[in-house]
Amino acid sequence: MNKLELKYHPYELKLSVPFETSKGKISTRKGFIISLESSSGNVGIGDVCPLPEFGSETYEEAEKRISNLKIEMKVEIEDFKNSLIYFLSDYNAYPSLKHGLEQAFTNLICNEKKTSLSQLLNLKLKREIKVNAAIGFLNPEEATSRALQFVNEGFKTIKVKTGRNNFDEDLRSVESIRKAVGYEIKLRIDSNGKWSVAEADKYLNQFKEFSIEYAEQPVNSLDEFKDLKSRTNVSLAADESIRDFDSAKKFISAKSIDFIILKPMMLGGLIPTLEIIELAEKNNIAPVVTSSFESAVGRTNTVIAASVVKSDIAHGLAVIQYFEDDIAEDKYPVVNGSIKVY
């Protein structure tokens, strides 16, 4: 596969209702679909969907790099993984582009070898994975109504965005949801790094009575997580702080977290995500794989990664409901709070 023809086209997905967090509102998602065609006529596709607020390059940076790409790569199919890792190391500063290129290459190799991605990477996948529902910034009444709707749809885990300027609104929303859904439903909170250590310590103490599964990204730096970990017995999860294998290794080694949130689009692809999953599980830290509101093409990587996780934890993959439309068929629909993998 020495000669590869690269093409790309942009896409835009509109959310039917904006999803609001402490980092702002997400109302549209823009990205690119990359296609690589080999001399044999086989094609591989990959999704490039930047989300700079959460740690990727910008849309404009990704497009500039794509438009200047000239793919001249000799891939040894029998040792494709090492050659692919070496080639993609040039794109470490552009994680969503790296994700798209990795996905396109692996998809192409699968088509060349007439095999599945799980067979290509020698992965043992679970046949079914649980997923959580997510609630952005809504008033307590709306948030509770949405939570009850999710429970009726079969979800057993709900993540609630926190980190408003007025903490009382966070507290009232979580309290109202917990009273409505009972204690059999797991609740997670996510403030997207909004709080200082002192604020997080104070606020998490107020959330204790609501039996929170974990607090996601309450603070930002490793030192802040270590400090907060020494102050609270609420389980902590890192998301935006984890953007490559090295940062994941530092957090895991410091024993500063109980859960690690992994977004393949923000980590540069499926392969680095799988490496972090393996490291986390060896150190008794639970990986949770989460979508970054990418297209159905990119979401296949998140499902594969989540299927590798050994624990029966719920993953953040239920995003299709937020889109007005998608660019491709959703191969892994959420039914009764879970996804069947094949």
Image (cartoon, rainbow, N blue to C red):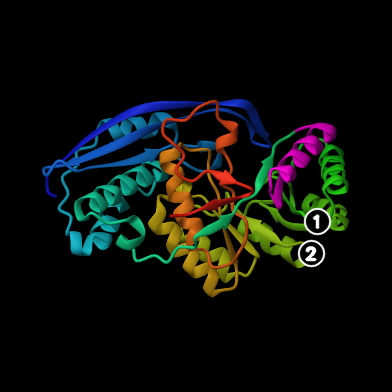
Question: For mark 1, what is the residue?
Answer: 201
Location of residue 252 with respect to 9 vertically, above or below? below
From where the camera sits, is residue 1 visible?
A: yes
**Magenta span contains residue 148:** yes
**Crowding at label 1, few (<14), some or many (≥20) Cα neighbours within 10 Å?**
many
Which quadrant holds residue 323?
A: top right
Indicate left or right for 61 with 27 as reference.
Answer: left
What range of the chain is rendered magenta?
A: 138-161
Q: Of residues 279 and 9, which is closer to you in this image?
A: 9
Pinpoint residue 227: horizontal percent, then vertical percent: 72, 62
Pinpoint residue 82: horizontal percent, then vertical percent: 26, 62
Say the numbered circle drawn on residue 6.
none
Among the two numbered marks 2 and 1 on one chain, the one whose residue lies closer to the N terminus: 1
Pinpoint residue 341: horizontal percent, then vertical percent: 47, 54
Residue at the image position 83 percent from the left and 56 percent from the top:
183
Which amino acid does the dot numbered 2 rest on?
Answer: Arg
Q: Are marks 2 and 1 in contact (CB under 8 Å)?
A: yes
Q: CA distance from mark 2 to mark 1?
A: 7 Å
Location of residue 101 with respect to 246 vertically, above or below? above
Say the numbered circle drawn on residue 231.
2
Q: Of residues 118 and 138, which is closer to you in this image?
A: 118
Pinpoint residue 106: horizontal percent, then vertical percent: 29, 51
Q: Of residues 99 and 42, which is closer to you in this image?
A: 42
- SS for callout 2: helix
**Magenta span contains residue 95:** no
From where the camera sits, is residue 190 visible?
A: no
Q: How many marks?
A: 2
Quarter placement of the C terminus? bottom left
